[in-house]
Image (spheres, rainbow, N blue to C red):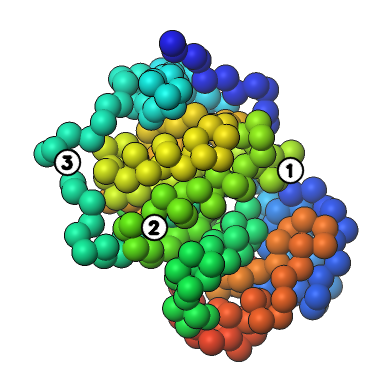
Amino acid sequence: MVSDLAYGGRQRGVKVALGASRRRPKTPETSRKGFRCNVRVSSQLGKNTQSAITAVHNSAHNNCEHRMKLYLLAALGSTTALKAPNRRALIAATGTALVTPLVSQPALAANDESIDVYFGCGCFWHVQHEFVEAERKILGRSDKELTSRAGYAGGNTKGKQPCYHNIQGKNDYGKFGHGEVVGMSIPASKYGAFAEEYFKLLGPDGSRPDQGGDRGPEYRNLIGVPGGKESPYVKQLLEATKLQGDKVDFAKGKGNDADLKALVWIMDTNDHPFWRGENYHQFHDGFARGENYPDSYNGLGGVYGGSLNLEDTTCPSF
């Protein structure tokens, strides 16, 4: 049975100001609300800089809206979702049915070696926290052993480090077609367990936590795994989604794909690798009202003097 991918009239939006209180004041260098919500910008920046930031935000919103409309015209005409035995299978962008990995395809990592993967569904702040907790729960990792990092993937940067929206316009991740994701290094045998944690983030109808606020390609559902749709880990992925209610469909991602409810794009990490985001995005409080994490979590990355002592990217601070 073939079902068409429907966009459902969703439009790209920005974070809605929820009035959430913070455990500590966030300056423009440690918070992105000035870009996401177009709300208060620190008065310390001055009126000229405030105007510049607002202009960058509005320009990014309008450009993304235009790209979204053009993309959907193409995507809706060429992409279909395929229902396979046990109700769930991946699909190629051409609509070709995906089959069980062939013997000539990459084998599962030998000796349970680590694999680099990523998961994304909306704002990466909350997602990172959930996978940090998964590393602790599933793998028993200590603070210094944690690998979950907020970042960008799913687009085409041609070797350039993508950056969050900034007034310089340098390497804007949205312009590269990236989405917000969390990357990590985990044992190959535990991929299914981490995939299951990912599907727990989605509601019963396949919607993500911020579906009503953050919308657009930058927040689309993404999973990155070595080999993409031909990966031997796809079997674990499908088993994991069935254990969590079988509530999403899958499609082969090509880069700069659309934001569709209850659909997850599968990316090959060899072609679409993970790029770590700026330090001020690491181990951040969630966006929702009251979603403040402990100081011990906020301090992990070194932004507040934490134990991981992360080296920052070359991206502008705002």
Q: Is mark 1 on a helix, strand or loop?
A: loop
As drawn, is 185 to the left or to the right of 305?
left
Residue 276 visible? The answer is no
Q: How far apart are marks 2 and 3 (CA)?
A: 20 Å
Residue 213, numbered circle: 1
Residue at image position (45%, 69%) is 139
Residue at image position (61%, 38%) is 216
Q: Quadrant of the C terminus?
A: bottom right
Q: What residue type is labelled 2?
A: Lys
Residue 190, numbered circle: 2
Q: What residue type is labelled 3?
A: Gln
Q: Which of marks 1 and 2 is in front?
A: 2
**Residue 173 drawn above or below residue 316:** above
**Residue 82 drawn above or below residue 120:** above
* Residue highlighted by disc 3: 105
Earlier in the chain: of badge 3 and badge 1, it is 3
Residue at image position (54%, 52%) is 197
Q: How far apart are marks 3 and 1 (CA)?
A: 40 Å
- The crowd level at tag 2 (other Cα within 10 Å; few <14, some 14-19, many 20+) is some
- The crowd level at tag 3 (other Cα within 10 Å; few <14, some 14-19, many 20+) is few
**Residue 180 drawn above or below residue 262:** below
